[in-house]
Image: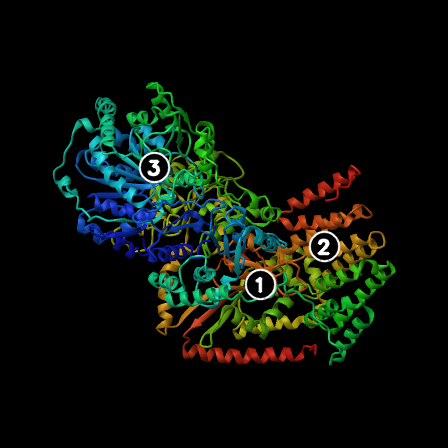
Amino acid sequence: MAERSFASEVEDLRLGEGEVFRGEGILAITKALLQSGVAYVGGYQGSPISHLMDVLADAKDVLDELGVHFESSASEAAAAAMLSASVMYPLRGAVTWKSTAGTNVASDALTNLSSSGVNGGALIIVGEDFGEGSSIPQERTHAFAMKSQMWMLDPRPNLPSMVDAVETGFELSEASNTPVILQVRIRACHVHGQFTTKANRAPRYTMQEALQNPQRDLNRIVLPPASYMQDKQKLNERWPAAVKFVKERRLNEWFGPDEGEVGIILQGGMYNSLIRALQYLGLADVYGDSKIPLYVMNVTYPLIDDEVAKFCAGKRAVLMVEEGHPEYLEQAVNTILRRRDINARLEGKGMLPLGGDYTADVLTKGVETFLEAHAKPLLGNRSPMPTAAGVLSNPKVKALADVVPQRPAGFCTGCPERPIFAAMKLVEQELGPHQISSDIGCHLFSILPPFNLGGTTMGYGLGPASASAFNVASKKKAVSFLGDGGFWHNGLSSSVGNAVFNKQDQVIVVVDNYYSSATGGQDILSSRAENERRSTNNSIVTAVKGIGAKWVRQIDRTYDVGKMRDTLKEALTSNEPGPKIIVASSECMLNKQRRVKPLFDKAVKNGERAIKQRFGVDEDVCTGDHACMRLSGCPSLSVKHTNDPLKDDPVAAIDQTCVGCGNCGEVAEAAVLCPSFYRADVINNPTRWDRGVARVREAVIGFLQRRREARRPVFI
Amino acid sequence: MGGQGGGVLSDWIVALAESQNWAAQSTSVPGVAQRTGATIYYVEMMPPQGDRMPVLSLMPTPGDVDVVMAAEYMEAGRSMMRGLVTPERTTLIASSHRSLAVSEKEQAGDGIADSGVVVEATPVAAKRSVVFDMQTMAEKNGSVISAVMFGALAGAKVLPFDREAFEGAIRAGGKGVTQSLKAFGAGFDRTVSPVAEVAEPRSGKEFLEPPQSLKDPRLDKLLQQIRQNYPAALTPLLYTAITRLVDYQDPAYAQDYLDRIAAIHRLDTSLSGERHNFALTREAAKYVAIAMAYDDVIRVADLKTRASRFARVDAEVGKKQDQLLYMTEFMHPRMEEVAGTMPAGLGRWLENHPAVFNRLDKLVNRGRRVQTRTVFWFFSLYMVGGMRRFRRGLLRHEKELAHLNGWLKLVTETAPKDYPLAVEILKCRRLVKGYSDTAARGNSRFERVLQSVPQLIGKPDSAGWLRRLTTAALADEDGTKLTGAQKTLETAFEAEQPRVA
């Protein structure tokens, strides 16, 4: 992390025995890793676990004191592979990423890791980006746990429970020689809470010890016949060991009365919402005291058959509260009940929605339906529940649906990617629409208004690869975009290498903004910042040439819309075989401002001459056609009504948040839009020379202005 | 919304609650929403019972929210749509400023959503509301909106904590404390003692009120014509128009304008226009003035070199006394504009000789960055602005005049047959705007819309149809919606069943 400091969060990592940590869930998990004697940590940044990576990247001193190795992995696959250090050695290791996106990438390594089994505890912390506000498809990490037979923890969403899950997760992993997935939902990662800390622990066994005493065991290598044996071990040794550990350590929890006609089984992550739902139904208090027996699965894989059977036995019906689909847990619980011939009726997705967030509102309705069917008296006299139904049916509130606009994510103010897509839009106005493959990253916002560019997105670094099939002779070439993040994650081999090898006649645009921006501005191989712990400044152009690309153009200032447009046109009309690669580079404005602004303010304060630029619009010149908006979408460029009664439509206006990136002027120039835009250069601390020249200019200009004004007829 | 400090605000609220020994929890889903999108931060708090800590929810439940704080007016609307604001319990604290969505900005016409709908819904949905422009207040106090909102929360007294506790939370945060406290105080005061907001009209557009007489005899002559020949209701509009045209060209040009309007007014009177409140005269007065003050190179140069403009830029940018400010204009003249600024004969000759025209275009057609506050560039623009006196003889003027005459001919021919349609033809002029290619596209859409006039004359709701075509033409850039609307029109009249929307 080059441009943002996590110094105060790093201080939290130093908290000792019995102190109180206050902060975000994901930071509590980070602290828990250090309390658990972890020896190495890796991962790939992404919402909602970026902070874990960011804070550890800034925590060199803390990590060095403890002897913990931290690495920003090149991808989730690299992170997962890193866990192989725990296969032979008693080293505790943890990796983290966004799921299911990252788990997909990591699954090759995870398959082999879980086959080998581990000696030291291996913990995979997945930030589950599920539900409202999610940026990825709604899939379940649960499937990966089942198919590779890794254990899965889904703790209750409060800091003490999550911290506890980290600590016991390592123990479970060691007790069963199996990697453990700790699943934390997005809101749990960002929840603010507190827990009592323990002292950090240095790893019992160090990385150096492992390196100096290398060990190998043929039985741990995934190659027949060892792999057949490993498969047997998974089923006959590791599974029972895990079940025994979970049972003995009581990792799952029971709440409410011991007996009851009905009960509820839930994933740990559903606990808070379910308690709220029960509260609405008059069946729990706000402190979690439930009138219905609850069985909370903090371990969602493996299931503990005996616990499930015992909970269900003697109950008329049990409700399975399981967020996400398909309903793996419901199926598994049913299997347990059938195998043991327990007659409790199991309800689940029949009474709850198949997909989506299980909010308190959703759960209230589901639990009510369940109780209606199986234990009506529990609902009592049904005090009124919170509802907005009345107000939502009011015509005045309904009318809002017609006016409140969608507010999709878009490029930030001054984003260097905006001019790239403005140029692409101009090219399409000339050459017609093209097949455009997009990728993962901020640049994907090109698919939304006002650019409306891009037809597919197949995965991180896979943009150009997803255009592969279009490598046929045609009047138009396929175009694909990928970011620098995607390029280094996977794109260099899967996309660029693939295109070079197959002589794909497509145009590849690498959007290089010096950071992995969408995940929070982390450094990557081609970042321009000097980073003493990482190797940066590795050129994308050199990399693609090294892999065999011939037609390569570097654009050093994406804001040069004219050049950007001409280069795209040149690429689209080139007859050269093989991919045409344009590397379009300019610094992410969010990070640039973080870097430059303090320096600028300091310079001004110190009396140095410093020029600040911003853009403006002459409202009497602007005719309100909004052509500029359709090539921008910048938050600082908006429209406003003027006081001119002879203008019907609002005119363009630029607000104080403008950072003077230059896009407005360049676009107006390249697209021949209009002369309304101006750039204002404000000179702070002008020199005597500056002031002298300005005085002369003012005198001449002022004279001419007064001369002309004097001749204008005056309405008085 | 991204960048408004929602995280800071929820941190303050949590810190406030914790400082009062309450249990508090906040959650959010920032993710991609940080990039200009909108997101919800959700906070729950309550006093613990001994050492029993409450189990707090991570998501709001509709109908169960005590305070909703919206940092933008349409977002307040969205929170009501989501059922988070209910009359039994919710205090709505919202900033009335707008941050426009892309969908509102990209339309060629006026795409700004009607805030009035949110105004209407607020008393229905909220138990109590605190609404004012918190953004402007924040800017005035050198802070961000989150600080003003925190002040409003304190002032609303929905939480049982006193002002000092709130301020303590800001101090504990440790960043930009002085400015934050100032903005907090302003928000607090404004909430505790609301000032009666001056009901702002939807736009401040008002025509100038004409004086009794003017000192300059040339101008007074124009004024007296307006006073004598037109209904009083039209005089402010006509007066505004002549001030614009005198500013644009000269008093004679304004006289030319009044002559054209007089002819239309006579026609209007003969058609018993008073029954329509002289709508024909009114719309002609407005749109002929706009058409005659067309945007050309001379006008742009004139506007860009005025002292009043320099002052406006200085104010907008916030230039301080000890700073210097230079402007760079982004101009991209093409040969079309240059030819338009030539004497009509020469310009036309060039246009008729594409080889010469294109070769010259290669020389001319490129982006020029004009530094208006330097002597050379100012003088160049000043000279172009000074070409005003030759304007009547230039090619562009000839073209504009032909266009104007053709359009007014259509109006005067249509008016006796279909008065409302003629009025709507005048309003179509709204489509003509922009420069260069944008203007060309606007013109072509204007022509395309007017092509439908012959088939509309005398048909039921003909004016309504033309208005819908105009709206469709403004809706998108490539004209797809207009094509669709014109198809609808054709089928509607083919079936002889005009649909009235």
Residue B4 image point, x, y percent: 45, 57
Q: Are marks 2 and 1 on the same chain?
A: no
Residue A328 vertical placement versus A81 (above, below):
above
Which of the two marks, 3 or 1, is nearer to us in this view? 3
Quadrant of res B148: bottom left
Identified by mark 1, the residue type is Ser
Q: Nearer the viewer, residue A112 or A59?
A: A59
Which of the two marks, 2 or 1, is nearer to us in this view? 2
Q: Nearer the viewer, residue A411 or B407?
A: A411
Identified by mark 2, the residue type is Cys
Residue A183 image point, x, y percent: 33, 38
Q: Which residue is mark 2?
A: B428
Chain assignment, label 1:
A
Residue A54 image point, x, y percent: 31, 50
Quadrant of res A493: top left
Identified by mark 3, the residue type is Gly
Residue A266 image point, x, y percent: 36, 33
Which of the two marks, 3 or 2, is nearer to us in this view? 3
Q: Which residue is mark 3?
A: A268
Callout 2: helix, strand or loop? Answer: helix
Q: How is the image coloured?
A: rainbow
Distance between the Cα atoms at labels 3 and 1?
58 Å
Chain assignment, label 3:
A
Q: Which residue is mark 1?
A: A676
Quarter of the image for the C terminus of chain A: give it. bottom right
Residue A529 vertical placement versus B189 (above, below):
above
Q: Nearer the viewer, residue B151 or A275?
A: A275
Callout 1: helix, strand or loop? Answer: loop
Disc 2 packing (10 Å; few <14; some 14–19; many ≥20): many
